Image: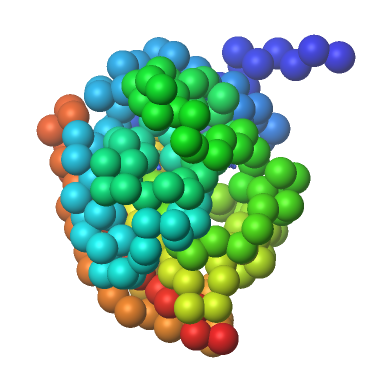
């Protein structure tokens, strides 16, 4: 039976998210995110970064060589992929649940799109991601906080632990405890560095963390915590 998708979506232009009369269960997340990327120009999205400087600085601190495997989860149409290519990284993997978001990124990259490994897959119901070889870096900006259920978080961290090699790194940037309670019309689960360290367990060491206030294209502020972990065992 075909789903009535319209009634399942939040109005993503409403910063405060869904009204109580709208369904928040059984959302078709692929359609939700495709809709977000089709309704709004990339550079007007509430998470757009003209230059992903904070991520780039943390990646620089990892000291990876140009052949390192870098997995950008929930990449959307991020400019981070463009910048990593400019820096010479040759093994970039871009994942998202939204095929449209990745198509937009491909369009922007032009011929360079052929040098990226594209993976449309759901981080909390992974199939293709499960079969990836281990990576040197897992990078997540503004994705983890959409996973509100314990089992979704468990699946996310299980996948991360499966994929990040020993001596590899995980960068997780997520709304902090002062952050907004919704993003793109969806409720979010907020973190501090200790909560993320607890999720990752003893195999990962916290190298660095800091709060960061991001200014959206609309001028509004979103409070993030950025964390860099190293896998030590
Ligand atoms: C707020 S955007 C951030 C995009 C990008 N990381 C950036 O910083 O510009 C969240 C992204 O996560 C993706 N996403 C949401 N749920 C996902 C899931 N379950 N699996 C993979 N990607 C997901 C969305 O499609 C969207 O591109």
At x 13%, y 33%, the residue is 219
The answer to whether 202 appears left or right of 219 in the picture is right
Q: Residue furthest right?
A: 1
At x 56%, y 67%, the residue is 164
141, 168: nearer the viewer: 168
Residue 127, percent from left and from top: 75, 45
Up the image or down, 203 lies above or below 120; here it is below
Q: Against 124, is 61 above or below?
A: below
Query: Which color scheme did the rendering employ for the protein?
Result: rainbow
The quarter of the rendered structure image containing the C terminus is bottom right
| Foreground of the two, 100 or 196 | 100
Closer to us: 33 or 85: 85
Q: Is 48 drawn above or below residue 197 in the view shown?
A: above
Quarter of the picture containing the N terminus is top right
> Residue 136 appears at what percent x and percent y?
49, 64
At 19% from the left and 40% from the top, the residue drawn is 51
For the image shown, how many numbered marks are present on the structure? 0
State left or right for residue 190 relative to residue 208.
right
Residue 173 location, quadrant: bottom left
Residue 228 image point, x, y percent: 35, 70
Query: What residue is rendered at 44% in x and 57% in y?
Result: 67
Q: Is residue 23 visible?
A: no
Q: Is residue 175 visible?
A: yes
- Residue 115 position, x and y percent, is 47, 36
Find residue 11 and report its image quarter: top left
Image position of 81 (left or right of 120) = left
């Amino acid at each position: 039976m075909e789903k009535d998708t319209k009634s399942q979506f939040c109005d993503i232009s409403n910063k405060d998210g869904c009204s109580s009369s709208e369904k928040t269960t059984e959302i078709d997340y692929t359609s939700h995110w495709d809709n977000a990327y089709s309704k709004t120009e990339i550079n007007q999205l509430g998470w757009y970064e003209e230059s992903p400087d904070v991520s780039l600085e943390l990646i620089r601190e990892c000291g990876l060589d140009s052949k390192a495997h870098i997995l950008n989860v929930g990449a959307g149409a991020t400019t981070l992929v463009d910048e990593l290519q400019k820096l010479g990284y040759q093994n970039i993997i871009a994942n998202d649940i939204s095929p449209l978001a990745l198509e937009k990124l491909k369009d922007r990259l032009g011929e360079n799109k052929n040098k990226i490994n594209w993976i449309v897959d759901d981080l909390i119901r992974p199939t293709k991601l499960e079969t990836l070889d281990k990576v040197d870096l897992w990078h997540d900006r503004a994705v983890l906080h959409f996973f509100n259920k314990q089992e979704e978080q468990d699946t996310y961290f299980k996948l991360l632990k499966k994929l990040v090699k020993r001596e590899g790194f995980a960068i997780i940037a997520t709304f902090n405890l002062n952050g907004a309670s919704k993003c793109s019309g969806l409720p979010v689960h907020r973190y501090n560095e200790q909560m993320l360290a607890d999720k990752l367990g003893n195999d990962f060491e916290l190298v660095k963390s800091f709060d960061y206030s991001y200014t959206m294209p609309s001028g509004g502020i979103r409070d993030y915590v950025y964390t860099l972990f190293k896998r030590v065992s």
